[in-house]
Image (cartoon, rainbow, N blue to C red):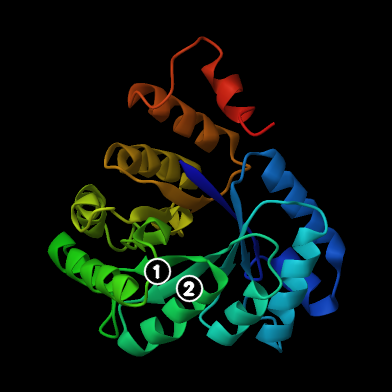
Amino acid sequence: MILIGERINGMFRDIGRAIKEGDKKPIHEWAEKQVKAGADYLDLNVGPAAEDPVKAMVWLVETTQEVVDVPLCLDSTNYDAIEAGLEHCKKPALINSVPADRPKLERVLPMAKKFGASVIGLAMDAKGIPKNAENRLALAMEIVAAATEFEVPLEDLFIDPLILPVNVAQDHAPEVLETLRQVPLLSNPAPKTVVGLSNVSQKCVNRSLVDRTFLAMAMAAGLDAAILNVCDDELIDTIATARIILNKDIYCDSYLKVYKGRGA
């Protein structure tokens, strides 16, 4: 399970302020805290506060890399900002993200090839997010075909079936799980799968419980990665326990401690 720490995002008040004021301290603190908690990647999103997204992304990449050595996930709809950030990444990054929209695929996939970056492809197009698994998979297949065309290795492609908040789009959740089950059938080698986990619980009560429950179900459906709160201990315990039940790790009585210490 690939864990992508979500917290360095300008939508959070402290990070938005830090980006606006050029204050490195919150960025350093959250970078170190997330890596200590087990993040394999750190998602970086300059958010709406940045007057100059390109300059802000470069600053965010450089500031984060001052204190941690994990690869970064550059998160923006501004592809100029992503490209500028990629130029300063010390390790191959993850581009978050591109929908099944031809002009955007033509912008992002050559960039991914140039920098050796992985890509998150969104199961949506200009019409929006489909309701059912069949249409999500059709869009995912368009992204797979485009990745092949632009010579981006399918092992470096992640498909995000796009989970929506369960309080307003409850009927989408089973369709997302079915999409996760079928993505491995799209190609050989198959793309990986990823979700933005906190989306499922937006404006819900018991957010952590909703996240944990959905994540365990998604893992059973074959989920490979998640953008999530790696500092939620109960969430990480759920991942460790699901991995035991799915026979991904060998059981021992201290399996929670073993899982949390895997990157130490």
In the rendered structure, find residue 152 and report the number of the disc placed on it: 1
Task: Point out the image quarter for the N terminus.
Answer: top left
Local crowd size for mark 2, using a 10 Å CA cut-off: few (<14), some (14–19), many (≥20) = some
8, 116: nearer the viewer: 116
Query: In x, y percent, where is residue 71?
Result: 63, 56
Q: Residue at x 51, y 69 (%)?
A: 95
Q: Label 2: which residue?
A: 113
Amino acid type shown at disc 2: Lys
Q: Is residue 112 above or below residue 102?
A: above
73, 16: nearer the viewer: 73
Q: Is residue 161 above or below residue 146?
A: above
Which is nearer the N-term, disc 1 or disc 2? 2
42, 147: nearer the viewer: 147
Task: Point out the image quarter for the C terminus.
Answer: top right
Whether residue 191 is visible to the viewer of this picture, yes or no, is: yes
Q: CA distance from mark 1 to mark 2?
A: 6 Å
Report the side of 234 relative to 9 (left or right): left
Q: Tell me if label 1 and label 2 are in contact, CB under 8 Å.
A: yes
Q: Is residue 216 above or below residue 118?
A: above
Amino acid type shown at disc 1: Val
| Farthest top residue in view | 253
Query: In x, y percent, where is residue 99?
Result: 35, 76
Q: Residue at x 26, y 42 (%)?
A: 221
Query: In x, y percent, where is residue 39?
Result: 61, 45
